[in-house]
Image (tube, helix red, strand yellow):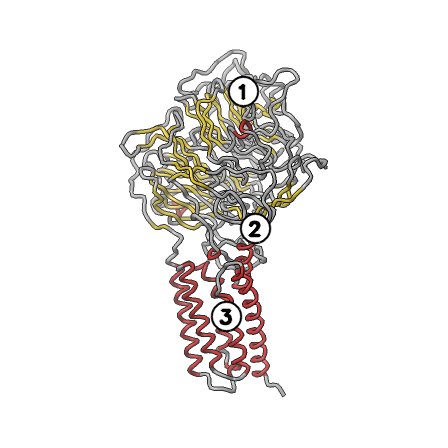
Amino acid sequence: MQTPSSGLRTLTVVIAIVFGVVLLGGGVWLAALGGSWYYIIAGILFIATAILLRKLNSSALYVYAALVLGTVVWGLWEVGSDFFALAPRLDILGVFGLWLLIPAVTRGFDAKGAKIALSGTLAITIAVMAYSIFNDPQEIRGTLTSKQPTPAAIDGIADADWPAYGRTQSGLRYSPLNQINSENVKDLKVAWTYRTGKEKWVFDPKLKADNTFQHLTCRGVSYYDADNTVGFAASLQAKKSSSTECPRKVILPVNDGHNTVGFAASLQAKKSSSTECPRKVILPVNDGRIVAVNAETGKACSDFGHNGEVDLQKDMPFPYPGGYIPTSPPVVTGTTIIIGGSTTDNYSTQEPSGVIRGYDVNTGALLWVFDTGAENPNQIPGPGQKYVQNSPNAWAPLAYDAKLDIVYVPTGVGTPDIWGGNRTKLHERYANSMLAINATTGKLIWNFQTTHHDLWDMDVPSQPTLADIKDKTGQTVPAIYVLTKTGNAFVLDRRNGKAIVPINERPVPQSVKRGPQTKGEFYSPTQPFSDFNLAPQEKLTDKQMWGATMFDQLICRVSFHKLNYDGIYTPPSENGTLVFPGNLGVFEWGGLSLNPDRQIAVMNPIGLPFVSRLIPADPNRKQTAKGAGTEAGVQPMYGVPYGVEISAFLSPFGLPCKQPAWGYVAGVDLKTHDVAWKRRIGTIRDSMPGIPLPPFKMGVPMLGGSISTAGNVMFIGATQDDYIRAINVSNGDELWKGRLPAGGQATPMTYESNGKQYVVIMAGGHGSFGTKMGDSIVAYALPDK
């Protein structure tokens, strides 16, 4: 008759054999692909433990102790003292080791000495894991030592206000306010929340969206006041006219019919009997319109365009709802509204143009165009003519230097993104570039290309940042910071596009090792790399593969070796290519926050691999519908000989196959462009609802930007967990966090009203990012004394 102890021991033997067989089989597969032999050894030792335990031999525990201790040494050799990287290597081993110490498992033979040995190795494991919590090799724990000088005034912008998307049209995302500072930010409380309560006015653009829309995106507002153009165009004088209905405007992108416009309460309306709209809101609406709205009353300005509207679909090739979407706030100068827009990725070769346009700020009349795919980009279409189809677009926010009267335009690749064998030099001339364009005439001044012949969706994704910095010789240089999905941060002289931080063209992969070569494709032999680079590392190895346990980590390591991957810019393939940095990039549309007084910057780089797999298809196949409606999964790429499947590189449990961290905050000294500190940010609290996980700071992906203040505080939402956080600008320490009612995939702002500083963020969530959707605007302030 089997006793309870013998039954438990039999179960233990079976579990050990199963574990051993799985590890041995998977380990042989991995080794055959060129990966680690560890799993073969671990499998053999698991099986040996099972056999010895079945024979009531105390050596079973000694063998298992050797496996645990060897794994600790191997793990430290592979990934160092990284808690989250060590966890899947040791969690199952630790739990099973504790199971082996249950008296019923070893009853019937003398295992005292073996238990002491196993207990000792488990104690070493616990000590290593405890040490690793406080000694993260991925983090940089330096300090930005510069003290905050008295903030320099910015012409035309009161310290208390935040009148543009990045506070300034130069994209600084920095405020000179310091009432909230690194000492008292821990006391922040919710000051007010806006949903459907008291309001001054609401304007509904009556957007009718459908599944042809790939995005419903609203990134912020731009503001225009004809009586105060200094902050917009110091070199220009506003054209004032008694016949102008809206001499002052705010530019707002809208993503649905219920978007509400709110502005700094400290701005008072300047009444004028000669104008109906002393201030304007101009709403780029997702269906391809600009609507001008009186900022005081919320009524449409009838003298702007046609009854307050300008049709952005005019003269577009292949227009359809959602095909062209103005997703970011435009630049506003003293005379001109300058706007770009998004086109549908990876759908077809018959898509609208990515043309950039300048409109009269008062009347809405078209002043100039810059069509990135045209031989003469400034040619306005005549009767019966259209803009160039599929020309590279500019979906991210633009930046503006008023003194130079230059607008800086970040561009992407002309769709389809992942196959480019049909692209001409003309089509790619201004793709993936920073364009410097005269804001009054639309003429190109200079351009710099960040990725050649892009096949990985490496758009220039964020608003560039303009700042005057000191170079190595001590001279002040007007710089532009161009952040890219590749992690390169290109630092150029914004007058002429010449490099301030060195840029080198380096050879990149020209073929794939697994599966057939892509038909009809060609590759750029080199790509530009900046000496200022925030990419997580040069090249992934299977050591960085991850999972919840050693078993799904093994699967991820096998999957890694089965994919084509030879570092960044490995070509897409039918076999499947690992794309790292992935489609989200290292930098997304959040950009950076730059303190020009301290000559420092803070930013939030991410790192999450994706997989792209080309699917052979008939380029002449019939299109079944308009619009893709998604950026993930199978995308048709009609008109070229491939479709493409794009997905995050995930384990069988749905976790990223690359070990954390997937998201950081970082502080940079702009005098040297060295990263002074880099820290993980965010937890998976809201990524796995219902599972009671401890709130470990893993470092999660982000969508959204940061701001910083003269109070030595960085504010950021963006993470996959629903928080806004305050970070110490000097060293990266987390000082405070506030729980949001939905995902904070937005850029915060701060302003002062009636002597009180507020920090405000839109908690709207993000559909394709998977965070909780909502419609709340939440403001925080210090409690009254």
Q: Work out whether mark 2 precedes mark 3 in sequence or the reverse, and give the earlier one.
A: 3
Viewport quadrant of the N terminus:
bottom right
Vertical comparison of 710 with 542: above or below: above
Vertical comparison of 404 with 177: above or below: above
Tell me, for residue 249, which label it has, or none.
none
Q: CA distance from mark 2 to mark 3?
A: 38 Å
Q: Position of residue 43 (x, y in %)?
A: 52, 70
Kind of residue indicated by mark 1 = Asn
Viewport quadrant of the C terminus:
top left
Q: Residue furthest left?
A: 474
Question: Can the viewer see residue 722 in this picture?
Answer: no
Question: Can the viewer see residue 624 in this picture?
Answer: yes
Kindly indicate the quadrant of the structure image that contains residue 404: top left
Mark 3, other Cα within 10 Å: few <14 / some 14–19 / many ≥20: few
Q: Nearer the viewer, residue 271 or 293?
A: 293
Q: Secondary structure at mark 1?
A: loop
Kind of residue indicated by mark 3 = Val
Report which residue position mark 1 lands on: 376
Say which residue appears at 48% left-offset and 74% top-offset. 98
Mark 2, other Cα within 10 Å: few <14 / some 14–19 / many ≥20: some
Q: Work out whether mark 2 precedes mark 1 in sequence or the reverse, and give the earlier one.
A: 1
Q: Nearer the viewer, residue 41 or 322?
A: 41
Report which residue position mark 2 lands on: 514
Q: Secondary structure at mark 3?
A: helix
Tell me, for residue 95, which label it has, or none.
3
Asked if disc 2 and disc 3 are in contact, CB closer than 8 Å, the reply is no
